[in-house]
Amino acid sequence: MEESYGQIRVLHVLGVLGLGGAECRIMDLYRNMDRDRIQFDFLVHYPADKTGKKSPTSDELMAVREPDYFDNSVLKLGGRIFCLPRFTGTNLAAYRAAIKKFFDDHKDEWKVVQGHMTSTASIYLPIAKKAGVPICIAHARSAGVDNGLKGFATKMLRSSLKRPGVTDFNFACSREAGISVFGQNQLDAGRVKIIPNAIDLGRFAYNEKIREKIRQELGVSNALVIGHVGSFRYAKNHEFLIEVFSQLVRLVDNDDLNQYSMLHGMRIRLLMLGKGPLLDEMKKLAEKLHVRDRCIFAGNKSNASDYYQAMDYFCFPSRYEGLPGSVIEAQAAGLQCLVSDSVTSEVNVTELVSMRSIKSEPRDWARKILDDLMLWEDHQTDALEEEIRLNRTLTQIAGERRESMFENEDTPDFDVLDDGWGFEKVNVADTERSLPRQGRKAIEFSIGDRSQSSGYIIGKLKSAGFDVKSQARMMTLFYESGRF
């Protein structure tokens, strides 16, 4: 082993090095590690048939493997990338042979093997242990499986992880993920260490200049933007998200009772970041529901943190998650979030989060979002004062709108009313509204005041264990000592 690679090397086992949640979290941690003490390597998977062999070596797979999103970052940080043939369910013998050869060829190179791919951890971790790796860890990052045969197979493959002795350590990003992968008994016995998905929180702190820049680039400077970040796959439940958005648009467009009159005439957009196998299907669904022209399918973004700034609200109706970093990121950006209660409650860190069942109708979710935006639950504010304040706020979102909010001649004079209140001021706490404006700077937190509340929100997220810098220090000590 070359000394230039670092004092202690840790091998992280993943499916790919793309822009997935686990990959982003590991890379955030990697960037913040003391790399004079700890270095990361990565073992990923690629189809064996690309080589024409059943059990190709890492070198043979790397020769045909297409570079992934984080490849260059890993190499620049001093890491190495290796490859195993992708497990298909029918190539168990060939998969085992490839793993055995890999660890035999790399004797004594890693003190730790950390497997984030728990679907096959029960296969590769015992082989690594037998090859002499001192510490073998299974790291659960999901609290569920897909429907059908694939989900059944995943459960079967993971079943042995519920027994003690298969690994040296079990990590999980949440209690639900720990129970799902390792079982209640292992958790109760203290054999599962809960390590929240750490995030570089400072990158997501609210920034007005970035907000204006991204909104201008997207053409939504004068729009209300509902946001979502996540790959287009079964767990993320995009079909429900698009149904919710469709209902939200209908509620505003067909608002005969004028419940949402302040939003009349305003452009409303759904901004979705991510790619995945269900992307085309979701575009067709948006077309079918007549909201395709109001949906922005933005794809993967290397500067995803900037896109949170452009959003005005975050909707996350996942069927299951381990601990979704995107909900933590959205809170760090100061966004009010409506989240499925199927997601672990450990994301409910700040006052910005509300949770609701995905068994509810999409229309109920849409009403909740609109009520949050309109402060419908606030019955203590003077009606005229509230209308003026909302006019100020919504005018700031819309800019100099050419469309009238109202169909009559009672349209307020927006130039007079607008004295600099942005959309982030829509949802302010009752305590703040009761104070004179010159006294509001003393308030630590108010829902919607993203700029003022940023420090308070980031502080709460750090206290809950989501700060990557603190976690990097903790993990450095663990990798060196083998204990917490």
Image (cartoon, rainbow, N blue to C red):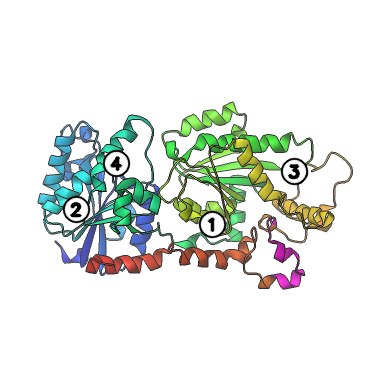
Could you say whether the residue bearing mark 2 is in a helix, strand or loop?
Answer: loop
Which residue does the numbered mark 1 point to in the structure image? 331
Sequence-wise, the earlier of marks 1 and 3 is 3
The amino acid pointed to by label 3 is Tyr
Sequence-wise, the earlier of marks 1 and 2 is 2
Which residue does the numbered mark 2 point to in the structure image? 165
* Residue 235 image offset from top left, x and y in percent: 43, 39
The amino acid pointed to by label 4 is Glu
* Magenta span includes 434: yes
Q: CA distance from mark 3 to mark 4?
A: 50 Å
Could you say whether the residue bearing mark 4 is in a helix, strand or loop?
Answer: loop
Sequence-wise, the earlier of marks 2 and 4 is 4
The amino acid pointed to by label 2 is Gly
* Residue 402 image offset from top left, x and y in percent: 78, 43
Could you say whether the residue bearing mark 1 is in a helix, strand or loop?
Answer: helix
Please say if 456 is above or below 448.
Answer: below
Sequence-wise, the earlier of marks 3 and 4 is 4
* Residue 201 image offset from top left, x and y in percent: 47, 62
Sequence-wise, the earlier of marks 2 and 3 is 2
Q: CA distance from mark 1 to mark 4?
A: 35 Å
- Crowdedness near tag 3: few (<14), some (14–19) or many (≥20) residues, C-alpha within 10 Å: some
Q: Magenta region: which residues?
A: 426-440
Which residue does the numbered mark 4 point to in the structure image? 66
